[in-house]
Amino acid sequence: MRIDVVSIFPEYLAPLDLSLIGRARREGLLDLHVHDLRSWTTDRHRTVDDTPYGGGAGMVMTPEPWAQAVDHLASVGDRSYAGARPLLVVPGPGGRRFDQAMAHELAAEPWLAFACGRYEGIDERVYDYAAEALDGRVRVVSLGDYVLNGGEVAVLAITEAVARLLPGVVGNAASLVEESHEDGLLEYPVYTKPASWRGRGVPPVLLSGDHGAIATWRHRQRLERTAARRPDLLEASAAVNGDDPLPIR
Ligand SMILES: NC(=S)c1ccno1
């Protein structure tokens, strides 16, 4: 997978050099290109914003640098990928909610590009321009119903959630199963040595060696934890599957 990120703070993406994502890049599983939007400015101050038409607080990101960034991505597609175009993801509070299902969707894409807005946002005409230049593949995506100062933090989160699903990135693919949100349930509690710690023990079933009993216990823990913390997930599952949210009584 190739990922391009355009930002006025490229150094914000430095954490993508670390840990599993950094190793995936070094092993060629992930081809990451981070671009400074200001490299597509022409004035002495490398300006990327201006006052909003219609008034209001703050500044709006001007369209031209973004259009040149989009043109660069299209030219990369023409030059190196037989005319292919990336799916452009623009993080923003007004976007479609990012979730594990979308992480899988994005992980199936060969090429993602992220546009990190700042200030009060990007001139709306850029979205239309990008849609024309990128075969209509532009998606505004929100991590949640809250406001960040820009898209970079969201790109870090989305990139990690997506890249870890790529074959070979997470050492043991089995660890991706039974994770929270993979099948509509939260994950079960985990324990490790020592068996007795500051007067607290480990559930005896986990020390029993009875794998069937352990699996049953873990599933029940997932159901109970989901019911306690995220009942909405159970209601959504019941609405879709028509099943009793807590079949184990
Ligand atoms: N909620 C998201 S993803 C966001 C991006 C910028 N501000 O909020």
Image: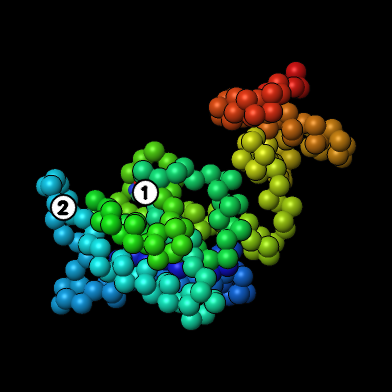
Count every numbered label the image shows and give the total: 2
Q: Is residue 44 above or below residue 193?
A: below
Residue denoted by label 2? 52
Determine if the C-beta at disc 1 is less than 8 A from ligand 1.
Answer: yes
Q: Spatial distance from mark 2 to mark 1, Cα to Cα?
A: 18 Å
Closer to us: 242 or 130: 130
Closer to us: 110 or 45: 110
Q: Quadrant of the C terminus?
A: top right
Whether residue 156 is visible to the viewer of this picture, yes or no, is: no
Q: Disc 2 marks which amino acid?
A: Pro
Q: Quadrant of residue 210?
A: top right
Residue denoted by label 1? 92
Q: Quadrant of residue 24?
A: bottom right
Helix, strand or loop at label 2? It is: loop
> Which residue reaches farthest left?
55
Residue 135 location, x and y as percent?
Answer: 46, 62
